[in-house]
Image (tube, rainbow, N blue to C red):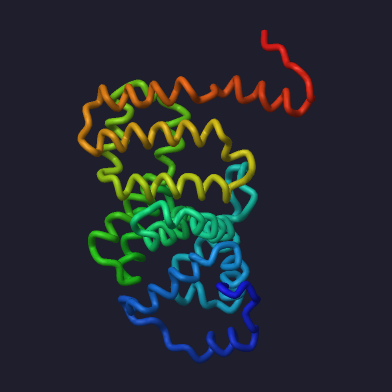
Amino acid sequence: AQAGVPPSRPALRRLAAAAPPLPVPWPAEAREEFVTLLGAGEAAVGVWEALEAEGLITAWLPEWERVRCRPQRNPVHRWTVDRHLIETAARAGAYVRRVRRPDLLLVAALLHDIGKGLPGDHSVAGEAAVRGLAARMGFDAADTATLATVVRHHLLLAETATRRDLDDPATVRTVADAVGDAGTLELLHALTEADALATGPAAWSAWRAGLVADLVGRTGAVLAGQAAGAAEAVGRGRSASRPTAGAERLAVEAWRTGGPVLSL
């Protein structure tokens, strides 16, 4: 994946036939190499699919079988669940320098929808599944808890930013309470972008990015111990300089037609 070349089929078949199963928990070296594969970006997608075709992925992650080739319910998605997950991890590779724990970002990106195929809310089901998965992969208790929180709340920032009043202090306080700390907040921010970009062209825009960044800034201020009033002032300043959804639509229409547009 790092070299950007396809893997050898005979080598993969030999690996699938001869390699012993990974011990539980995984050795640190195995976990680090797994994360390195995820961090290879777009080149990792083809390698991952080749590994999956030989049954290696489900040998390492039995839970993957539930999402393999599973169709999405929402038509905004362009990929099946399994392809969406590896695409999200590939996108997340571009944000590893924005977070303090790149390994947790990449693993969370790969597993954020692992609860699909289980009964109930996939975020809640995914949180429980990831706790077992992370422990089996050799993450310690603190890292396991962080991964579980990120998977549980991977939709929180986008849904709150686009559906709730960000000027309401209770909105920001609710997000801060759910996130818990600044490290988890930055992981969620990066995952939100990677998830949307891996979903399809309709899932992300400058308007959504601005709203999410606004919410992250306010939440970060609260988590840093600043007064809620100061956080609101920061948010209002950003809101004043950010175009509204209506203004963004008019700008796109003006660019498309090459002339002025009229709003009634």
Residue 115 appearing in the image = no
Residue at 59 percent across and 62 percent down: it is 42
Q: Nearer the viewer, residue 158 or 238?
A: 238
Q: Nearer the viewer, residue 240 or 155?
A: 240
Left or right, residue 256 beside residue 74: right
Residue at 76 percent across and 28 percent down: it is 256
Q: Position of residue 146 (x, y in %)?
A: 30, 54
Q: On the image, which quarter does residue 53 sit in? A: bottom right
Residue at 38 percent across and 50 percent down: it is 187
Q: Nearer the viewer, residue 132 or 83?
A: 83
Q: Is residue 32 above or below residue 110?
A: below
Q: Is residue 196 above or below residue 28?
A: above
Left or right, residue 209 beside residue 216: right
Q: Is residue 81 above or below residue 137?
A: above
What is the quadrant of the C terminus in the image? top right
Residue 110 appearing in the image = yes
Q: Position of residue 161 (x, y in %)?
A: 43, 31
Q: On the image, which quarter does residue 34 sit in? A: bottom left
Residue at 33 percent across and 76 percent down: it is 28
Q: Position of residue 239 (x, y in %)?
A: 44, 23
Q: Position of residue 165 (x, y in %)?
A: 40, 22
What is the quadrant of the N terminus in the image? bottom right
Left or right, residue 14 beside residue 101: right
Q: Nearer the viewer, residue 146 or 94?
A: 94
Number of residue marks: 0
In the picture as drawn, the residue positioned furthest to the top comes out as 264
